[in-house]
Amino acid sequence: MTTDSDRPLLRFAGSIPPEDLQLMREAIEQDCEQVDINEW
């Protein structure tokens, strides 16, 4: 049986509004899909 102490972050599930999640998803996709060859 799983308890709250087993998963301390579970209490935050659903606390971020869907609109904010969409904005974060778009930012991650935009920034993470680009490769900067001169970065290294």
Image (tube, rainbow, N blue to C red):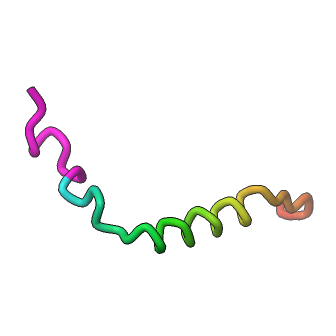
Residue at image location 71% in from the left, 58% down from the top: 32
- Residue at image x 10%, y 44%? 5
In depth, the one of 2 and 39 nearer the eye is 2
Side of 28 relative to 19 (left or right): right
Q: Position of residue 3 (x, y in %)?
A: 8, 38
Q: Quadrant of the N terminus?
A: top left
| Residue lying furthest front | 18
| Residue at image location 77% in from the left, 56% down from the top | 33
Quadrant of the rendered structure where residue 36 is?
A: bottom right
14 or 5, which is in the foreground?
A: 14
Which span is picked out in magenta? 1-10
Quadrant position of the C terminus in the picture: bottom right
Q: Residue at x 43, y 67 (%)?
A: 18
In the visual, does 32 lie left or right of 25? Answer: right
Q: Quadrant of residue 29?
A: bottom right
Q: Position of residue 37 (x, y in %)?
A: 91, 58
The residue at the far top in this view is 1
Viewed as shown, does residue 13 lie left or right of 32? left
Residue 16: give x, y in percent of width and height: 35, 68
Q: Magenta residues: mostly which secondary structure? A: loop
Identify whether 7 is placed above or below 35.
above
- In this image, 10 relative to 22: left or right? left
Count of numbered marks:
0
Query: Residue 6 magenta-drawn?
Result: yes
